[in-house]
Image: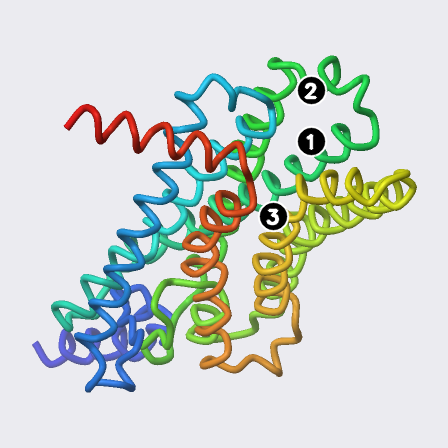
Amino acid sequence: AHLNVLFLQMNHQEKPPEDNLTELVEFVLLGFADTPHLQWFLFGLFLIIYIIILMSNGTIFLITKMDPSLQSPMYFFLANFSFLEVCYVSATLPRMLMNLGTQRRRISLVACATQMCFVLIFGGTECLLLAVMAYDRYVAICNPLHYPLVMNHKVCIQLVTGSWTTGIPVMIGHTYQIFSLPFCRSKQINHFFCDIPPILKLACGDTFVNEMLVYTVAVLFVMVPFLLILGSYSKIISIILKLPSATSRAKAFSTCSSHLMVVVVFFGSGIITYLRPNTRHSEGIDKMLSLFYTILTPMFNPMIYSLRNKDVMIALKKLLCTYILAL
């Protein structure tokens, strides 16, 4: 019996400490726990924002599908973009609202990985779709005579399908690679959703390879689309400036100004978050930047596109009139 006890003790001592790392089955999303007196105010605020996002983007999607005057490629992409925004914000806001309402901030390892995967997929899709929308404006303004031929329905379907599917295997593999790391530090994630920078901070050992992969994926899905958008708009602006009258210049620029505003806000906050050096990461700044590209941008996008687009406003008025008459 004495030998058996010694044998068991030796086995226990020989176990490397890393074997216990797999026991971590959940994290704690701190979110806005540093402001306990504002929890219910934030819950109400983000609930209102979520409702606005669902209703506004849903309305844009609805009118672009129903109104015959909005059946051009530009509005086909806008409908997909609005649907994407609903998916994107639904990957983070419901969980944040639940955490604020119940004060139970625990999230399982699987749920955290799933949330990160969906956020990355939808975020990558948004970058690609914004690049597609910029290409659409480039063809419309720089090659207007060839526009119906170049941007035919089949091409539009292919571009949208490519935007939605290209990032799926990459982001799934990227998420799997991050959550294959051993986590030996605190369980507390100082964020309101499972984002890459705060998760990597909890991993033990050398995370250099993982950080390089983050930069690689960010370059492929953020910087490359952003540079393509810049290239498209440099051509667009040069063509617009050559137009003979101020009226035609204003009209041409109005067709792409809304998209340009969305690009600046979304890509600006995303690039700063994922491509700046790790040594300069501030958790508070990361949370604020994440609010921009995950919540505030989806809320303002329908306002930007509808208020600056006469066709959308006319279609919206028609929809409201139809609804009122139906009542």
* Amino acid type assigned to the residue bearing label 2 in the image: Met
Percent across and percent down for residue 87 are: 37, 43
Residue at numbered disc 1? 136
Kindly indicate whether the residue at mark 3 contacts the one at mark 1 (C-beta within 8 angstroms).
no
Kindly indicate whether the residue at mark 2 contacts the one at mark 1 (C-beta within 8 angstroms).
yes
Lateral position of residue 31 relative to residue 68, left or right: left
Q: Quick one: SS at disc 2?
A: loop
How far apart, in angstroms, are the residues tagged by discs 1 and 2? Answer: 7 Å
Which callout, 1 or 2, points at the residue further toward the start of the chain?
Answer: 1
How far apart, in angstroms, are the residues tagged by discs 3 and 2? Answer: 20 Å
Residue at numbered disc 3? 258
Viewer-closest of 327 and 209: 327
Lateral position of residue 323 relative to residue 165, left or right: left
Residue 119 circle label: none
Which callout, 1 or 3, points at the residue further toward the start of the chain?
Answer: 1
The residue sitting at 74% across, 45% down in the picture is: 250
Viewer-closest of 60 and 202: 60
Q: Residue furthest left?
A: 1
Q: Which of the 4 image quarters holds residue 4?
A: bottom left
Which callout, 3 or 2, points at the residue further toward the start of the chain?
Answer: 2
Percent across and percent down for residue 115 are: 35, 53
